[in-house]
Image: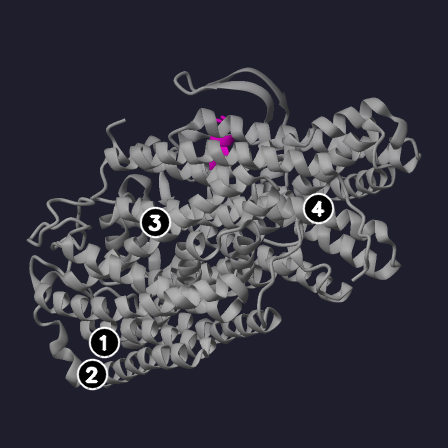
Amino acid sequence: MEMLWFWLVSVMVAIYVVMDGFDFGAGILHLVVAKTNEERREVLGAIGPLWDGNEVWLLAGGGSMFLAFPKVLASGFSGFYLAIWLVVWCLMARGISIEFRSHLEDGLWRHFWDGAFAFSSVLLPILFGAALGNVLRGVPVDGSGYFEMALWTNFRQGPQPGILDWYTVLIGVFALVTVAGHGALFLAWKTEGAVHDRAKGLAMKLWGAVLVLWIVASYATSAVNPGIFHRLPQAPLGWVASLIFLAGLALVFVGLKRERFLLAFLGSGAFILGLLAASAACVYPVMLKSTLDPQFDLTALNASVGSHGLRAGLVWWLIGFPIAIGYLTFLFRFHRGKVKAAAEGEGY
Amino acid sequence: MGDPLFWHRLQFGFTATYHYLFPQLTMGLALVIVVLKAMGLRTGEARYNDAARFWIKIFGINFAVGVVTGIPLEFQFGTNWAAFSRFSGGIIGQTLGMEGMFAFFLESSFLGMLIWGEKKLSPKGHFGAALALWIGSWLSGYFIIATNAFMQHPVGYTHAADGSLQLASFWAFVLNPWALGQYAHNMIASVVTASFVVAAIGAYWTLKGIHPEQARLNLRAGTIMGLIFSVLVAFPTGDISGKLVAKYQPITLAAMEGRFESGPRANLTLVGQPNVAQRRIENPIQLPAVLSFIAYGSFSSNVKGLLEFPEDQWPQNIELLYYSFHIMAGLGTIMIAIMGLAALLLWKSRLDTARPMLWVLMLAFPFPYIATAAGWAVAEFGRQPWLIYGLLRTIQGGSPTVNAGHTAFTTLGFAGIFVVLSVLWLFLIGREIAHGPVAHTQKA
């Protein structure tokens, strides 16, 4: 049961990254791929109806972690205190930027929100990537089950690293480039004309960079946490996940080459989903690795709640998850086809 | 000030109070919009859809601010209240998780369709989007209230080997009697807020002599709903909430009333200032034996005073608790009076020309906001010194590794962000009100 919840939480978080990833990507790139007001409204029109639902995956995933592994949530959120609040403030700025921009037909007003949208969209994946980096590297959890970490120290590895060190920033940059590539494919799929052409051109370069960064990041991960890939050969789920992300990566390049952007976008989604699932398989059952002593690790087994709660949660999860997927399908069908910039006062 | 707990509490109280200024309007407005869209569908009259269109704009701005100010609350469980989360996450994680799964997905999926979809969707489809937002936001309300109710009156739990709480009965937890009472009271209060806002806009346009048809419609809708729901918020739902406090938190009841001595035929204090050091109410104006009746249904019932309980069980901030309760109850009474009078004038067809009454309606819209904030202050100050009543004290709930410097920093950050948000909100809402209702030129 604990193992099942470990995977449910991992899958929810991975879906979150895939879903919010493409609207982050759109935010990262919009100043570059969309030059005029009309073009920026095209980008916002593509993600506007979806971003809020995408973000719910974070809250639903966080809620699932809260109910199944409260000790991990308590330890991680209080330990990453300042980084978490930077994330929250960026999420707030982003939401307001998307929702308020179209209210005023004024150049300065819109430039301001464009800037806020781009800034928060760049910072968020770096921070989320750094969070993943911390999970892979480990944090100084002690016998109390808690840890305290500065936002940064000297950017080196050691028993008391900062939340940001060279490794976690590297993972952050990897995340940034990956979701930018993911967003570029989404925009190439959903838009036409100048935005489409620019997104297409960028996607090729970004995915080249993803490939390089993926190799560098994997090498760095094995340097920082030497045993991490040892589990992979014995974990069947890890094999499946690895196949998914490799297939996804191949699809991205095939799709780009044949100009089938939906295919490439699905490929980049599979790449992100598979890579995160493979990471989860590598660390399982550890959820927060201790840099001090392995006996302090918070794992799916020692940090979970009792079985009644897990079973009750599973029942409503099995009802709620298909409903959520149903809404998602409905939304994508409702907004199918290429996006047009909305008329003034009638959309994002 | 060097105590992290002070900052944790200040931060949660501040961010939660600020956040709830927005959902209390949107939850109530969602119902108003559903009613307006339903009337539009039934009668085919454009004025209902025109009114709905205006309120959907107001709804959209408030909803956006509600969403972004709600995110920090979810995170504070883990960041600032780690010990509390560790202790009770196995229980309250259930409702918080369900809120995401069943309420937020529903709301976020249909929000865009409600706000921008009137031309794209059929009239029935647009009504459906309004319905989805209403159901979603009211579900969300239930999950939050059920979470809070567990902290007020914990049920359905058991202790695990390490002392933390485990779920023992899902349904006992989700159908906590406290949650049912508090939910009814709170959701009806949200409709009161929306009604006062709708009536205030109607009164404003009437006084200015602009948008006459819409002014009349809003005035009418706001007054009728305002009267019904301000009565319901007091009776039966406020009454039920009071009896729940009397039953499960008798110390809180005593502190709310500033009652120190026990005894039958307890007086209800209308006005007076609690002097906790001297253990008495100063300058009291009281109704004899009424508190006994309200709390236990009989004038002769014994109502315990604070002195009957050990002092370490008393809420720490008795003065604030006392005033919060009296402000809530006082404003509740005034609101019933305002809406009663307005409804009477409406019935006599004189409301449109009764300028003093229109002034009152236009200026009274902050009352439900203040009463709601005060009501939540009663619930939260009244729960002290417990974080989970009888199980976990507030001083045990904070994050052990987060110091005052961290939390002061983020609290001040929120103060800055909320100033900016308030200015933006005022500006955008002001613009929408100045724009007024816009008729659709082309039918979808």
Residue named by callout 3: A87
Q: Is residue B267 left or right of residue B144?
A: right
Q: Callout 2, which amino acid?
A: Ala
Image height check: is A243 above or below B78? below
Find residue B428 and report its image quarter.
Answer: top right
Q: Earlier in the sequence, mark 3 or mark 2?
A: 3
Residue B345 is situated, as x and y percent measured from the top left of the image, at 88, 32
Q: Amino acid at mark 3?
A: Val
Q: Quadrant of residue B234?
A: top right
Q: From which residue to which does the magenta span run?
A: B251-261
The kind of secondary structure element at disc 4 is: helix
Residue A235 bears which disc, if any? Answer: 2
Above or below, A253 relative to B331: below
- The residue sitting at 36% across, 44% down in the picture is B387
- Identify which residue, B433 or B127, lies in the foreground: B433
Same chain for marks 3 and 2? yes
Q: Nearer the viewer, residue B318 or B110?
A: B110
Labelled pair 3, 4 in contact (Cβ < 8 Å): no
Give the Cα distance between marks 3 and 2: 32 Å
Of the two numbered discs 3 and 1 on the same chain, state the one appearing first in sequence. 3
* Residue bearing mark 1: A281
